[in-house]
Image (cartoon, grey):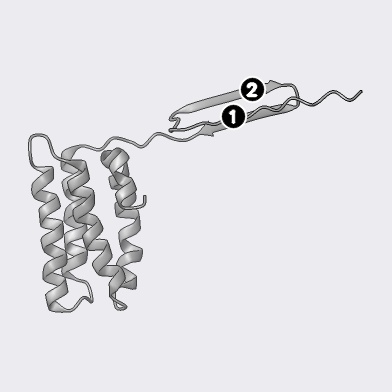
């Protein structure tokens, strides 16, 4: 007679940070996950405000029409005000920046600004922590 093979199912949820290796083997299964993610450098509030000032300058010098430009700058100013609070909401800052990014994306004239914005947003990623998913970074 034939023996019915056993089956095994594994599910991993959540996230793993740092340099982590997970290995499992048994039967006919073998699972290896290598996670060599460099942890984001935590930036100071002054560095954060400097990055937000760069974004505001980018908005001021953008090709956005006047009405949209003023709206974009107001989103950035809201983010700056929130960062200056005793316990700033990272979600609020990320949502404000997302609104600014969405204005740029909606404008066909702002392609260059979006390209310039990417490295600045990358600098903010460490401070935003899990809220960075709002921006898609």
The residue singled out by tag 2 in the image is: 24
- Left or right: where does residue 21 sit relative to residue 124? right
Residue 38's place in the image compared with 59, above or below, is above
Q: Quadrant location of the N terminus?
A: top right
Q: In this view, does 11 lie above or below 65?
A: above
Please, what secondary structure does the residue beneath circle 1 have? loop
Assess whether mark 1 and mark 2 are in contact (beta carbons under 8 angstroms): yes
Q: Where is residue 94 in the image (x, y as percent from the top left)?
A: 23, 49
- State the residue at coordinates (31%, 52%): 135
Vertical order, 110 against 58 (above or below):
below
Residue at the limit of the structure toward the right, as seen here: 1
Q: Residue under circle 1? A: 10
Q: Residue at x 80, y 26 (%)?
A: 4
Residue 31 location, x and y as percent?
65, 29
| Residue situated furthest front in the rendering | 1
Distance between mark 2 and mark 1 Cα atoms: 10 Å
Q: Nearer the viewer, residue 26 or 42?
A: 26
Q: Which mark is residue 53?
A: none
């Amino acid at each position: 007679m034939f023996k019915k093979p056993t089956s095994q199912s594994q599910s991993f949820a959540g996230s793993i940070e740092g340099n982590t290796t997970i290995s499992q083997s048994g039967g006919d299964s073998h699972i290896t996950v290598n996670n060599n993610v460099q942890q984001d450098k935590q930036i100071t509030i002054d560095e954060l405000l400097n990055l937000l000032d760069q974004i505001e300058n980018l908005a001021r010098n953008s090709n956005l029409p006047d009405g949209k430009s003023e709206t974009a700058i107001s989103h950035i100013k809201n983010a700056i005000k929130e960062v200056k609070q005793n316990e700033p909401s990272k979600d609020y800052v990320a949502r404000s920046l997302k609104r600014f990014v969405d204005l740029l994306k909606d404008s066909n004239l702002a392609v260059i600004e979006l390209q310039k914005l990417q490295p600045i947003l990358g600098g903010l990623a460490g401070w935003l922590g899990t809220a960075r998913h709002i921006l898609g970074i």
